[in-house]
Image: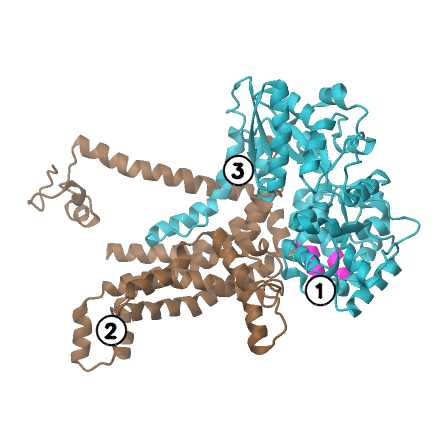
Chain colours: A cyan, B brown
Amino acid sequence: MHHRPAGPPGLRRRTLLRGLAGAGTLLALPGLAGCGSGRGDPNLVTMASNRANPAQREAIAESVGLFEEDSGLTVEINTFQSTPFQQSVNNYLQGTPDDVIGWFAGYRMRFFAERDLITDVTDVWDQHFRDVFTDQVRSLCTADDGKQYMVPDSTAPWAVFHRRSLFEERGYEVPTTREEFVALCERMRADGIAPLASGIREGWPAMGTFDHLNLRLNGPEFHLELLNGDHSWDSPEVRSVFGAWAELLPHHQADSLGRGINEAQTALVRREAGMMLCGMFITHAFPEEDLDDLDCFAFPEFDPAIGASAVEAPIDGFMLSGNPRNPDGARALVGHMGTLEAQEIYTAIDPQALPTHLDADTSEFSPLDTKVDAMVDDAEALTQYMDRDTRPDFASVVMIPALQRFVSQPDDIADLTASIQRQKVSIFGR
Amino acid sequence: MSNAPSPPRTRAPGRATSPRATARGRAGLRNSRGDRITLALMLGVPAALVVGLVWLPATVTVLLSFTRWDGIGGLDTIEWIGAQNYVDAFTIYPPFEPALRNNLVWLVVLFAVPTVLGMFLAVLLDRRMRGGALYQSVFYMPVVLSLALVGFIWQLVYSRDQGLLNAFLAVVADAPPVDWFGDSDINLYAVLVAASWRHTGYIMLLYLAGLKAVDPSLREAAAIDGAGPVRTFTQVVFPALLPINLVVLVVTVIDALRAFDIVWIINRGRNGLELISALVTSNVIGEASRVGFGSALAVIMLLISLVFITVYVSTMLRKAYR
């Protein structure tokens, strides 16, 4: 689409028009959706996986291989890069999607359930999963109609990551309160270390800071309601979040808007930064021999009345497309992906993933996994991350530019929250 | 064969339909049935394609710009909201105004730098110097590189912590690292360097083609009259390049309006790199699926393009009928 044809000028003019009109063409397509879903081979199940890291591919292949052996079915795995898949998922689900699709629990799954783009799998839950997941996980896989639409397999929670050896060398203590956290940041700066690695060029990594501050200052209930559109963004609560962020901003790596999240992770690996608020996917950035040195703690408490137990634990799972070509095979496959055995195979290979199954064997866990797993188990509430807990249009079109603007101009908070609120009303319609 | 009476000599059938021949011989021209079928096919198929692939989607885009729709479900889920999307774009959508401004800056810079530079390179290469073909390929290379590769190359150059440019500045001038991509005051210009890098090669090729077509006798005459190389270029060759200049003008305007790929790969067109095309994409194509709002932005972009397209097409048509 963006290749530059070295053609004659007439062609380029037309290319422009077609490009402009392309959006329109794409929109005309959904009308045709659903025509191409012929019944296929009863022994074949297709599966779209958005887990594209080498370790994730291997983990999926192992787990699915076990299913193929047991069931005698053949599974065709189509792997997509996670971010591009996310960006095209609306069109993908309305076209001829694969039978089983890797996706996120929570708001983002409910959104598709409401639109009938995915299939109810309550029967699979009744058969296998009634008592093997926590109530929280079950509610995250349940749509507003009370039915389950997703089988969860793993989670990659967020925490403040750091190198254990650096903390030991310098005698840093893990902070548990706002004061300790700020004091530690100041000490690190005095030692010539950037306290908090930060790379938000891609936009979405900035959401983690907002989420955690809001969870600690206003509590998980308010946080989820706010993201659900129930509260005004132009409120003292939201302004207090940005205020606390403004206090932490000088402790973040400088020029974070120009840095990709991978570069920020590299800063932590290289000991140029002391800590990083990040998801477990940071394990992919650490060299294998250094993984033992990676440690973490929960984002500290900011208000004793709220505590620090809410954990941002995005849960991944598998759902059935709206009209799977092989419904029985697809049900069997999602049923398999939720089993203890499948989860243990998967999470043993993918370093970022922790199993969601209650009976998962934790004896083989690394100390890091054990710690994070305990954080998730003890959490009074699990949230999914801002772009999974709210409307995607609000998250990407409004919040990312707003958070980036805040980081570059942290002084005009009132103006910023007013602008977010105006756009929120336009998008949520309330 | 065509039985057109005038001119009487046999002509290839394709030539007989050129505007000039038709204009002259319209009264006496009678096409055979086969000719008419051929004509109908040759005009009808492209016309159907243009209507189907250009006009129809463009019309749909205009219609959708008055709606709120997330692109999911049938047409009955479309909600008509009048001009609300346009009002929102101009009033409460913070990236919109910077996007208009950035597109304008983009246009001005494309004219000021790569167009002039491309012309200069073309004039140099036109002198049949040794290794001319090699230079030509080198300058043209960026045009054919893929989007992903271009983004990767400039990431290597501009990265704050690991980039070539900051490392160079640190060694040479002991300068503190500059945040080329993240500082919204300078990132547009940093990216424009990259965009110009690509555009120069393209303009160079256009001018090179134009220069090859300039009648050498013009230059000889100028030389005999005692004009130096600069004067020959400014007063003889450049005026003869008028058609190419027009093409370059349009190409540059269009490139400035649809500039997209580099900013998209850097930061999705945010934080100082807002462009209308990137806003349209992030609203419509992405997961956001704000189809109505994105369409409104696309229509605004279409209207701006139409101004330039109309000028170009009318100039071209005027010339064709002259």
Residue tagged 3: A27
Residue tagged 1: A409
User: In x, y percent, where is residue B37?
Assistant: 23, 32
Q: Does residue B71 appear anywhere in the picture? A: no
Q: Secondary structure at mark 2?
A: helix
Residue span colored magenta: A401-417
Q: Secondary structure at mark 3?
A: helix
Q: Residue at x 6, y 44 (%)?
A: B8
A289 left or right, relative to B258: right
- Label 3: chain letter: A
User: In x, y percent, where is residue B147?
Assistant: 48, 52
Residue tagged 2: B236
User: In x, y percent, where is residue B90?
Assistant: 61, 55
Q: Is residue B186 above or below residue A381?
A: below
- Quarter of the figure with the C terminus of chain A: top right
Please tell me which residue lies in front, B25 or B206: B206
Q: Residue furthest right?
A: A305
Q: Residue furthest left?
A: B9
Q: Is residue A69 above or below residue A306?
A: above
Query: Which kind of residue does numbered mark 3 sit on?
Result: Leu
